[in-house]
Amino acid sequence: MLDLIMTTEPELLDEVIDFGCFSNSDHRMLGWKLNLDYKGNNLVTKLKYDYRIIDKEAILCELSVIDWRIIFEGWVGDCLER
């Protein structure tokens, strides 16, 4: 079976139901019940940058000292190895 339900907290799923194949496909229809009473680790810390307050001059200064010809010379694979 290739049709999957992906989750980082499997305890959220109470039941998985296989409704069978779509009419003209080999993909299956799946349903599930969510366990909304689950009290797992639902604290998520996400780092968000506020790009409205960047130091544009400092960024431009840093970018101006890079020798871009050296960075991008050669083949694509060579650039990825640097």
Image (cartoon, grey):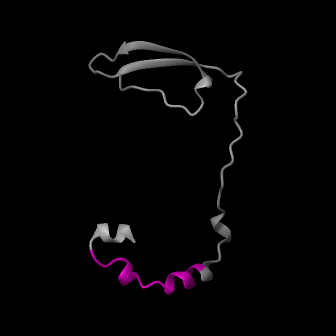
Q: Quadrant of the C terminus?
A: bottom left
Q: Tell me which residue sits at (36%, 26%) in the image.
A: 2
Q: Residue 35 at what x, y percent from top left? A: 65, 20
Residue 76 placement: quadrant: bottom left
The range drawn in magenta is: 59-74
Which quarter of the image is occupied by the N terminus?
A: top left
Residue at the location (50% across, 86% down)? 64
Q: Where is residue 55 drawn, in percent x and y? A: 65, 77
Tell which of 2 and 31 is nearer to you: 2
Label total for image: 0
Asked if the magenta segment contains residue 65, the reply would be yes
Q: Decide whether residue 63 is among the magenta residues.
A: yes
From the viewer's perspective, tell me whether residue 31 is left or right of residue 43: left
Q: Main secondary structure of the magenta part?
A: helix
Give the residue displayed 50% in from the left and 87% down from the top. Answer: 65
**Position of residue 15 measured from the top left corner of the image (x, y, whole percent):** 55, 14
User: Which residue is painted at 37% across and 19% down in the image?
Assistant: 28
Q: Is residue 57 left or right of residue 64?
A: right
